[in-house]
Image (cartoon, helix red, strand yellow):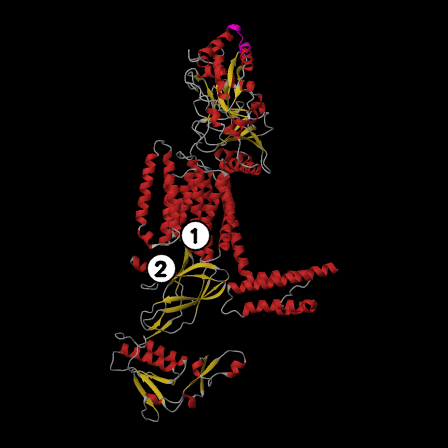
Amino acid sequence: MFLAQRLLQLTLLLLWAELLISGHLYVLAAIAIPAILLLSLQPHSLVRSHLNWITLVCLLGWTITAITKQENPTTWFTSLANLLWLMASLKLLESVQKRSPRSSALVLLLSIGLAGIFNQNLSASLLQGSCALLCIAALVALEAGPQPLASLLRRSLMLFAIVMPIVLTCFLLLPRLPALWSLPGSRASRTGLSEYLRPGELASLVQSHGMAARVRFSGPPPPPEQRYWRVLVHRQFDGYGWSQGPSLPLAKEQTIPDATILQQWLVEPSQLAWRPWSGHGLPNTTGLRINSGGGLWGGAPLRQRGSYGIVANAKGDDWRKLPPTATDLALPEGSNPRLEILGNSWRQQSTNPVRRLQLARNWFDSQPFNYTLDPGRLPRQSPLDAFLFDRQRGFCEHYAASFSALMRAAGVPARVVVGYQGGRWQQPLGTDTYLLLKNSDAHAWSEIWLPRRGWVEVDPTSWVVPNRVRHSLAASLNDSDRRLLEQRAPAWLQVLTNQWQGLDTRWQLWVMQFDSSAQERFLLPLLHGQRQWQGLIAVAAIGLGFTGAITLIASINHRQSQQDAARLALKDCLIPLAKLQIRPATGETLQQFCQRAAVAIPEQEQLIKCISLHYNSYRFDSNPSPTAQQLRRLRQQLRAIKAELWYYVRKQKDLA
Amino acid sequence: MGFAEWLKGLQRRLGRTTPQLVLGHRNLYILPSSFGGLWLLSCVALYLMGINGGSNSPVLLAFLMAALLLLSLFLTHFNLQGLKLQVHPQRLSFAGQDQVYAIKAISKTWRPNIKWRWLQPGAPAQQRQHIRPGQQLVELRWHPPQRGRHLPGRLLIHTTAPLGLFRCWCYWEPPEPIWVAPARQQGPVQLFVSANNQTAKLSSAPNKQSGSDLFEELRPWRSEEGLQRIDWKARARGRGWVVKGFSDIGSSELWLGPDLQLPLETALEHLCDRLCQEAAAGKAVGLRLPDSTKLPPASGRQHLERCLKVLAQLPLPGCS
């Protein structure tokens, strides 16, 4: 009972630590759970008599917290989860006071499962698995009585190992039910791209090192200057910032059977309904559609880590050929007068959009622009004028926004695209290589419409700082700015982090993102398209798994019954003698065997006779039956004899 | 036939009354425990949580718990299957005292948390015990209803190990009776001393030493007994310190009987106590009862047990 309680307390502590680190605990739960845990360490009559009051106070606190958090409607699920975690700690307190920890273990298992919705990365999953193991060990401890912790954990691990093939079979083969309703689940990312692009916004975002996405390629990755991953397409300019504007039509979902997946994306939770992609190919995951602006629409904000593949599209990218609308040329008159004048001057110099683009590049090249993470706040009045003609210090969104506005002033349809550029190529040992995109890779660039070519990407930032695109953001910054980007972790830790992220990527893609479509992809080739056999095969495989598990347990039991610990120790001790071809004969007692062996090896006579002496005294002197201590002593004695016999055997071999 | 009678008949059929019971498929029953039911509900809840929350962690946990549930069906059954139970000679005991009913359990494997419970009303609380490999004496508390020769009744043997998800059980009615002598209570008894038709006082108890030529038993030696009766031959052969007990066939015989002035049960209680006292003192006594039952004077444990069994068997007042 005591051991079970301690194991459950450890489980709650680990769960609390995981939830605290991931930031899903409300302040109330973050404080109350360890406090309740402390109270549960020692049964106390005062606590027992005031258990109802403690529960009432916790519930009251939770109600107040939940009401204050209801500004965001998606937090109700987090509130309920906090309530369950709080109740799990209270149940544990009750079980310690009233000695009934079994139901507490069950509530903790539910809490672990709930934590699995919020935290899905590899480290969290491992922690959750350990918590589940501790809960099972606590249940075993309740039934098996007092025993050493190591033995208890060994038994629990053995149970885990025996059922694991069955669990994997169920996971891989059992048909997945579709979601009956949608849980809000995890929070969206706290940092990330937003729907409205204000000047200076990306500059602060890139200082966050949070992970944004991971991409695996079927072939080699594209060269650095082609690594543009689009997310949002901003078409509406209000004189200060950019937004998406009127919604564009979505293309029909297309499925391309047997197409090779060019890119496999694993995207972190995001507040946006748009997913990053390269702009080439087609998504092969249901629910993803491309709009006429070239954005990949996921239908809803990504509340969980998501995965999708992009396959090749032989027909080319349809969205690039869709002609611009009036929105793509709109420029609020008088919002940035100097910019309008400059753009107009290019319009008058040439009617050819390509020539106007060249004039813009020439102008950007001629100006002393400074690329910086700390551009300062732009004035609300004529912000782009202030950037282009006065300050000339800016980050990528300043250049992209200004260039797109200039192009519109010059009569060329233009828009701003926000997404990621570059990324870090990760090559962890033993796992697949992938491209890691962080928030610090956030980038903005422009797209202009050129007749006969369609929408063409233009990155004015690359004109100002070519290293930004060819190398990395850090390479394009001055020393003071680079310090803002620096990670404080030492190099060795970064290497370890990269390795861990590699494993995490594999975990995410193989396990966490294994949904019904992934199951279909996995099973169809194995079933040769005969999907109707899936249920039968699943049932047969699970039955086989259980048969194997039961056979294994029965054979372990049989082995234990046939050969007890003392017998095994004796068998082990006689191995060195077997090396010298001295083996027990059929019907020979241990004493007779030892006498025979002593005659064969007279130098070790005393030692060999000790085997029989110790074993027989253990077997027959103990009244009524040997204790664990006596067994331990016998094992030690036999081990010592074995070591000496081994030494003798080796010496004999060396002499030979 | 009413439902209660049918249930009783069923219970009778379920209970085994053989002196040895090997637990197996024919006599073991298994059903999910209430905790197992909650566990199953939790599996369903976790699975729903997983598929609706878009996370595979709860789904994996649900599969793990479901697999453990199914596996523990077999593990719980294995925990009792193959256990051999044998009746064991029971010690004579006294009414009104908590007693122990011993059962020999023979197992090849370690069996954790086996619970034992007598099914009679007012039976002691359930006992739990871990069964070690080999032979083990399981001592179960038992409340004797009154003096007499009793069968212990129906025993429920059950387990929920290893996870508490299933409850596996069987019934057994051990056929070995337990003798319950009247409760011990100090008080007057009738004394009859017959030595050539002369009445003697209690203090003139016959000298055992001179008349102790009928060997009765061997029993462990106690230091206060002196060295006279130690079996030195046995000691020399390494059998430990034992004392020879002898029946008394002396010429002066002490007989005890119930005091007929008192109610029978009280008189028997007094007699029972006196018999024990005399036996502890090593004196030879005979038993003479109103129904003309006689046990000739002797000493030793076996004689005492014979006497107490006779007292235990006397018809209870009000019974024909």
**Image location (x, y in percent) of residue B152:** 37, 67
Kind of residue at disc 2: Leu
Quadrant in which the C terminus of chain A appears: bottom right
**Image location (x, y in percent) of residue B257:** 31, 83
- The residue to which callout 2 is attached is B10
**Overall secondary structure of the magenta stretch?**
helix
**Image location (x, y in percent) of residue A390:** 48, 15
Disc number placed over residue A6 in the picture, else none: 1
Above-or-below relation of B120 to A49: below
* Residue A352 painted magenta: yes
Image quarter of residue B85: bottom left
Question: Which residue range is magenta in the image?
Answer: A348-357
Is any atom of residue A410 visible in this view? no
Disc 2: host chain: B
Is A196 left or right of A557, judged from the image as shown?
A: left
Disc 1: host chain: A
Compute the Cα span from label 1 to label 2.
44 Å
